[in-house]
Image: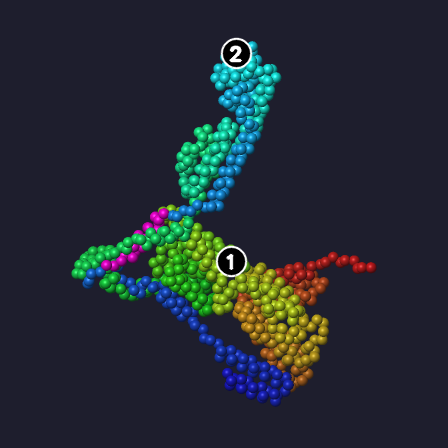
Amino acid sequence: MNSLRSWAQQIQHVCNESGKHLKQSASMRSLQRVSALQKQLGKQPKVPKPVTIVLTSLVLSAALGQRFYDQPRLSIGKIAPETITAPRDAQVENKQATEEKRRAARSISTPVWMPDVALSDEIRKTVQSHLDAGLKLRKDAGEFPYVELEKLSEPTQRYLRKAEVWEWKAILEATQAPNTQLVDRISDPVQRRAATELFRNKNQTTLDGLSGLEAKITTAQQHYVTARSQLSAPYDPTLFDVSDVAWQKMQGEVMATLDRMLMQGIAPGLEETYVRNAITLNLQIATPPETRAIATQILVSALKPNLVKDEDRTRQQAELAANNVELVMVNAYRGRAIVQQGEEITQDAFILLDYFKLSRRETNWWGLVALFGCVSGSVVIFWRLEQRYHPKGLRNRDYWLVGLMCLSTPLFILVNVPSTNLPAIGVLMGTFYGSVLAVTGVGLLTIILPIAMGLTWTQWLPSAIAGLTVALFAARVRSREELAFLGLGVGVTQGLLFLLLGALSGVAWYSLLGGAVLEGLLGLGWSIIAIGISPYLEHLFDVVTTLRLVELANPNRALLKRLASETPGTFQHTLFVANLAEAAARKLGCNVELVRAGTLYHDIGKMHDPLGFIENQMGGVNKHDLIDDPWQSAAIIKKHVTEGLVMARRARLPKVVQAFIPEHQGTMTIAYFHHQALQRAQQDQTIIVNDEDFRYDGPAPQSRETGLLMLADSCEAALRSLKDATPDDALNMINKILAARWKDGQLSESGLTRSEMSTIAEVFVQVWQQSNHQRIAYPKAK
């Protein structure tokens, strides 16, 4: 590299002896050659994609094929080729059988229930409110008895208070007769007794006294009707027949019974019949018979399960029960046969064979080869879909990133993580490479994992379906907040799937709740991890996601703030170009977010010399008039590309965004200063004009997005110059500019077609019309 620098200095020294303009052009060409050579020397050789695919398949197969490395030839279910005897006495634990017994002990362990104090207090308040409501109803019904018992008996007063109007009239008519003939004719014994007692009062009291008695009865009836209309559960009309003494005693017994039952606890799922029977048994000791039915209804309406499971103590009790399980041991005796020739190897026999190292363990090469074939086939499927949906192809670093994500799954399984990280892979691949490749990657892993690693359905199926779901939708999110909500949905989906699949397999749903919650938390946790590491992977592997592009387009980013403050004219130019390019990208179905972000950064290099560009001169002196040297002016103009790339690399902008900086100018000629140079060459025959001195280094646009930026950038100044032009005038002018770019070959590698030029022109005119709409001419102030 030092020799290159000295060579460049020698070339510059020689050129200093030449003419002024010849010196400038020659030195510039030589420096360009040095720069190109430096880039070539510094470029790292790329690994061919087939090599990357093979290496990825080998590494994944090695990680997934753990169980093939030390596989027994004599395994459970196989036929013993010969009789194998025990070399010595031994007692070996059957760990699988022991673990099954422990799981059974855990599952049948009795849960530990504890009274819920807050719920018990709530039940007490409910019962007390019922008692208060009953007391108010009794007060509304009036005192009882409402007349002296010497005049009317308690049963008669009770009957008269709730008698219907027609009954009361019949009784009064019977008592108006001079004798008891009408009274004796009443067929209802209760009604006849009431009429008899009233007739007796008629003969024993004055007329005024009898009228007062009838008035008291009528008043009591009115109060009773009013109170009865207000009755609601848990009360019925028998509430008004209870004496005050019995009512007071009943209230105390109700609260005492309630406290006993809440202290004993009511378990969830207990049938109401058992609760009612328990209430009856508690009340029949001290509660008056006339109030038992009311007290029972009050308690039945308020009582509900107040026991909650103490998860910690239940878990401790379950573990204690599991730890108390006796180990399942398999005995072997020296010289005795573990398995006879021709017999099927049982689990106990295999345990002894493996213990004595007689199971003939070895590497299952055929299994590894078959696994490598499956993995290779999956990688090829992924590659073919990548070619179809990503025509320009993924980079080698993308393959390595996808391989690392896939490699992480078996590694997490090997360290006994309860659930696979497929949701995290779905989030990352969906946001990095789109839904198709994400669903393909997660789907292929979902198929290979249970085959290669022998996973149970609980270890992979819920997380696999959740991973496929998030892979399908992750590419559509436009903010970290949306991605966070998607992660929450993944957790819920994974938990519900665990519950559903477990219920379908015949397990009681309530016993799966704990596992479902754990699965949901694991799904949410994987999503959070994916969101957290995503920015680091984006920078490390130079991956561009929609979210990152949206963040890069934030005007508060450091480079964009500098662009707005140091080169305000360029910033306004950039905004208008962004509007043009973004509208065209939306119309053509291109990556709108990439166009927006790339356009905002395409002219950051102008900050190296703001006054070198006319949009920042604000009507002041043109710097290039003072320089009066088209070669030097062209160098200043061209430098905004090289300086822009330097700034972009320092800011660690993604390479796809950096590509907008050189490609928006392509290999076009800086026409104005090139024309000036040609004029001077005509006047001075010693001046040699090299077109390369006035041509951007390129490359020409390599994507539809950068091609749209070139066209928008070319049309922006022309559109701004139009004042009173019609849309047709604007369209004709734009078509000429687009045709010139097409004819110059600037769009030959962009992927844009000739037929799309008319569509782009129409969109540009629409945006121009929107930004140059007419306004009302307000009258001038006098």
Q: Which residue is mark 1?
A: 483
Dot 1: within a 10 Å radius of its alpha carbon, few (fewer than 14), some, or many (20 or more) residues? many
Dot 2: within a 10 Å radius of its alpha carbon, few (fewer than 14), some, or many (20 or more) residues? some
Q: Is residue 326 left or right of residue 465?
A: left
Q: Which residue is mark 2?
A: 180
The residue depicted at 33 percent of the width and 52 percent of the height is 321
Decide which of 179, 644 is in the foreground and name it: 179
At mark 2, the secondary structure is loop
> What label sits on residue 416 in the rendered view?
none
Place residue 736 in its image quadrant: bottom right
Is residue 503 shown to the viewer in this render?
A: no
Is residue 640 shown to the viewer in this render?
A: yes
The residue depicted at 39 percent of the width and 69 percent of the height is 55
Q: Is residue 572 above or below residue 105?
A: below
Q: Which residues are magenta?
A: 91-110
Spatial CA span between label 1 and label 2: 93 Å
Percent x, y for residue 146?
55, 24
Q: Is residue 97 magenta?
A: yes
The residue depicted at 18 percent of the width and 61 percent of the height is 334
- Three-letter code for the amino acid on which mark 1 is drawn: Leu
- Three-letter code for the amino acid on which mark 2 is drawn: Thr
